[in-house]
Image (cartoon, grey):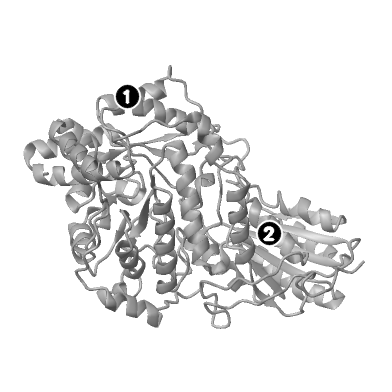
Amino acid sequence: MLPAVRVTSALAIAAALLLPAAAVAPDPFPLDRAGERWVEQTLKTMTADEKIGQLIIPSFESSFLSTDSDTFDYLATLVRVYHVGGFHVFGTSESAPPVLLNPTYGTTTLGSPLAAASILNRLQALSRVPLMNSADFETGPGFRLAGATTFPRQMAFGAAGDVGLAREAGRITAEEARAIGVQVNFAPVADVNDNPRNPVINTRSYGQDPARVAAFVSAYVAGARDGGMIATLKHFPGHGDTDTDTHLGLAVVANDRDELDKVELVPFRLGIADGAQAVMTSHIELPAIDAAPATPATFSPKIVDGLLRGDLGFGGLVYTDSMSMEAVTKLATPGEGAVRAILAGSDEVLQSPDPIAAFAALKDAVASGRIGADRLDASVRRILRAKAFVGLHRSRAIDLEKVSDHVGGRAHEAVAAEVSARSLTLVRDDRQQVPLRVAPDTPILYLSVVDYPSGWRIAAPSRTFIPELKKRWPDVTAIEISDETPPAELDLVRAIAPRFGAVIASVFVRAASGSGRMDLPPALARLLEDLAPVTARTRAPYIACLFGNPYTAAFLPGVPAVLVTYDLYDRPEASAVRALAGEAPIGGRLPIALSERLPVGFGLDRASLAARGRQPLP
């Protein structure tokens, strides 16, 4: 097991100390006179029910949805009867049999940009107060919607080392999201991933150094603002130093206040000072701020009203993380959870497992005085100001004919490809075999090493790597192995490996929300280690490309060459093949520490073969 290594750079400490304890951030939603007038007039004419509804953000899936359907009727009821403040846009899913005949089935799929825009247009038309909609577009809208742009994970940006690319990703994401009717993006992730055993943040973070993370966070916020979108810092007050997935249970950050100021809070302070307009709280306990047992930040006035709004001076919107996560559903009913979140200082209750029950409980709390009228108005005023800031008081409908002009496209794709290529980090090349210089007719053994075979509905491993490899070296024998591969078959791989002129292993290890898993199975790690002496005897190049969890590198100390991508899906596979073939340089730097010998900032440089004035062997 990797030890947790915390990095507190001098710049991070300086940033924390320079920002006063009671910093006052700028007005997050500056409005012109017409906008101010709309906010106050709207607030004055709203009923209590309309105000309460503004605090609730339910969700929907973005597949085609007929207006004449039970699902649309339900969404329409949430608008007409319960006056919800907006909707959260997901991709979509497919039905699977209750008893899986094939355990490799996955149910999650990508939604449609046009479907999302169409649904949002119809719901906007039903709402007296315009809806302000959100999405988890951490890696761009393509993270949820097919055909939209997908960027690499944030850690890849950290490895590429260019904050300008983060700003451009924020701007492009804003352009595409606004084109489908989404105004709030739950990104960037401002967590400092300084715990290698973190199963839920991992590559979603820009890295391990607080100051560098803060710089990328600030750049992304600026890019989102350039594109007219509200960026959301998450997961306050910092989810990086945990080893619990809050989709499955309540996590604890045990650091004292001094450590919080030096590490966890650094990106949030800078992001807020630089104009971030929304913050998402996390379902984590923080005993240094609130020692009450079973009180996550979501339910803690000391953390939300005290630390965030008071000490950090944040005046923007506060969203809860999904209230359907087990970290909070185990602590409170949907109704009581909503009330406790608002009492803690949040403005928006996101994805309650029962939004109607949440509305009823909030209404009872207002009627009884548990939630005061002034407290309710304060949140509603912030929400209305945010809606005016993004122009919803002037126009709320989306032009469906223009969606395809703004979503996806070659220019946006080129930015994502640049990040992917520049992020590749060569952490080991003991035999100087990268790039791969073998003849085109060399027989290559390709191993697609998968952590476990289920759940790959969207990103089947090696679906791009294998065809791209065969374009360069046609004689490829490809084998997939996983935790379900019998020992005898692993032994067969050991036996046949000496017959090949090169061995390439793509290692796919996910740190996926809700899975509870993040490791390469020991039997697969042993196999990869065993191939090192075999290839040394035959003098065959042996290279491992890591996709997903980069900390996997620490469990493969004997593999002679290791290339880290920080990502999954098609683009990093294509980028890795180009780098291995010497068609692109390698220059990424580790944004995290993998070991004492592989610290933050480490990375081996390799020029492309063309840049060296050399060509692959004929």
Residue 255, image x, y percentages: 31, 73
Q: Which residue: 59% across, 55% down?
A: 416
Q: Earlier in the sequence, mark 2 or mark 1?
A: 1
Quarter assignment of residue 252: bottom left
Task: Tell whether 433 sits left or right of 195.
Answer: right
The answer to whether residue 85 is seen in the rendering is yes
Q: Nearer the viewer, residue 237 or 405?
A: 405
Amino acid type, callout 2: Ser
Task: Tell whether 350 sits left or right of 539.
Answer: left
Spot the residue most to the left.
Answer: 369
Spot the residue most to the top.
Answer: 68
Q: Which residue: 57% across, 66% down?
A: 550
Q: Which residue: 38% across, 54% down?
A: 246
Q: Nearer the viewer, residue 358 or 482?
A: 358
* Secondary structure beneath label 2: helix
* Secondary structure beneath label 1: helix
Spot the residue most to the front.
Answer: 33
- The alpha-carbon separation of the residues under discs 2 and 1 comes to 46 Å
Quarter assignment of residue 567: bottom right
- Which numbered disc covers residue 126? 1
The answer to whether residue 527 is seen in the rendering is no
Q: Is residue 66 above or below residue 108?
A: above
Q: Nearer the viewer, residue 452 or 220?
A: 220
Is the Cβ of the residue at disc 2 closer than 8 Å to that at disc 1? Answer: no
Circle 2 residue: 575
Q: Is the residue marked by circle 1 packed among few (<14), some (14-19), or many (20+) residues within 10 Å?
A: some
Amino acid type, callout 1: Leu
